[in-house]
Amino acid sequence: MASKRRYRGIDQLSGRDKVVVGLMVVVPTLLVLWLVWIPAIGSVLLSFTNWDGIGPLSDIKSVGLQNYRDIATIYPPFWPAIQHNLIWLAVMFFIATPLGMLFAILVDRGVAGTRFYQTSIYLPVVLSLALIGFIWQLIYSRDQGLLNAITGGTTDWYGDPSVNLWAALVAATWRHSGYIMLLYLAGLKGVDPSLREAARIDGASESTTFFRVIFPVMRPINIIVLVVTFIESLRAFDLVWVINKGRNGLELISTLVTQNVVGEASRIGFGSALATIMLAISSVLVFIYLRIAMKED
Amino acid sequence: MSVTADPVQDRTQALLKPREGGPQSGRRWFLPVILTVISLIWLFPLLLALVNSFRDYAYTAKNGYISWGGFTLDNYKNAWSQGDFGLHFWNSFIITVPAVLLTLFLSACVAFVVARFSWRINLALLGFFMAANLLPPQALLIPVYRMFRAIEVPFWFSESGTLLNSFQGLILVNVAFQTGFCAFVLSNYMKALPKELYESAVIDGASVTRQFFQITLPLCRPALAALAVLQTTWIYNEFFWATVLLQQGDKYPVTSSLNNLRGQFFTDNNLVAAGSMIIAIPTLVIFFVLQRHFVAGLTLGATKG
């Protein structure tokens, strides 16, 4: 049999091979279809219904855009949540990400002890945000926290709705900037050294070299960092959930969705409308990310 | 691929030689000082937790945290028993290990097909998986939760009788979400392998299965190692799905179980610190021992190797 086999090009497939290749694609595809894409479509469809989650699926009635109208008009936590997500995004974008970039530039200069600096700054990246919430409790706690001990204040940093978002954001920045530093360090290493050399010979200052030469060259990384920052800000959840389940000053869209499903009041249609809003925002970001990531192909 | 600092260090070292009269020559102490300060600030919260996890609650309650003394190991003993960490570590283990292995296997399959055969749908296929990796999990919660509750499984498969509140369900969700990232990284890696390797295998009549297991996978070992380290950390740290899909406290993995150390009205922060350290140990060990893989895994996705 084997001797009869003729070479018909590298992509030739026997009947059995075709089955194997098919399975290699179909099995993972079905899994992701089942647990990601069908739920995504399900969220969108359910958002136009009034399902309370108790009755049979046949009881579902379409209510058009009613859920969306309710969210915007008679659901008090919604606008604060949007505002908090935007503040979250702004802090990550204007503070955490530039900080990470700055760290990358400083670390990349390669002074003695670089490994120590680099390691210390990205150590928080390996910790879960849930754990980070607990670690920062030592600093933020009202009665025993370090911050109040130093300042002599009595602020409940995690509880007081006027400050707890900012307290959470400091902890989130602590982790995010390490992550961004890592991405930029990889980016800086990929920059052709002769570019720097050329800029130096032309007499460009350090900062001119960076902003006019290095930064533009890192465009793919810049965009990936940008999208990562946006997506992470939209998905922010663990940290506020361990602090107080996203209430009382820490409402985020992600926590509202969760509260509407696993909480006491399970309002499926309503929660789905919130989920759909999240999906709509993220799909724009995902689209941008995919275009960049796959451009080379 | 390699992310060690050395080549860069050499290069930057050369560039950093102070120019005569240049701005560098007078301020060489400046950068190390700034970096040291930043590093210490960044390490501080962790060091604070570490130090206080060894301190007696009564002592710090009386003297405050700006004090020194009251050292004890009791917090660890109490945290371990009160938080039931033996059980929760076991839960984490039986969730993380199968999830990582399955993720790597399935994503290697997808990546292999995408990289090895040139079909038109390849890009769409990869996009299908990667987008899944980036969607916010909360937005998919309702249908997943409802489906899992409705799907009945035999009791030998899961004692809860449904996929909800079962380890298998949680593992599958983790796999579905992580496959995209790994498939993307691995497909880039596999595309860089020379086609000739397969050519001779095909002429020898090696089946696709053999090509996959005996040529591709062994050559992808560095990428697989990096991804394994990264995924282990991520799935171990995963909080959201574990919290909502597992409904019994005794099924929680460690990351979701820290709440056990929080009293209803009163929280012993030193106890929580000890618990936090216990939970952080596996990831910190991974971090220090396999740091290179961890960084490689994170940056592989962003920079295409």
Image (tube, rainbow, N blue to C red):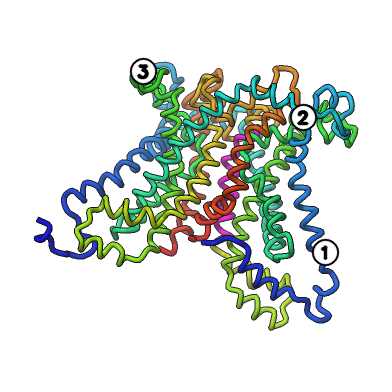
Instruction: Say which residue appears at 40% left-offset and 16% top-offset.
Output: A55
Q: Position of residue B99 (x, y in %)?
A: 44, 37
Q: Which residue is mark 3?
A: B155
As drawn, A54 above or below B222: above
Residue placed under numbered mark 2 in the picture = A160
Q: Residue at x 60, y 49 (%)?
A: A229
How far apart are the alpha carbons under marks 3 and 2?
46 Å
The C terminus of chain A sits in image quarter: bottom left
Residue B151 on image: x %, y %: 36, 23
Residue range corresponding to the magenta coloring: A222-240
Q: Are marks 3 and 2 on the same chain?
A: no
Query: Front-most of B212 and B188?
Result: B212
Q: What's under tag 1, amino acid-wise?
A: Phe
Q: Quadrant of residue B185?
A: bottom left
**Residue for point 74% across, 63% down:** A112
Left or right relative to A99: residue B184: left
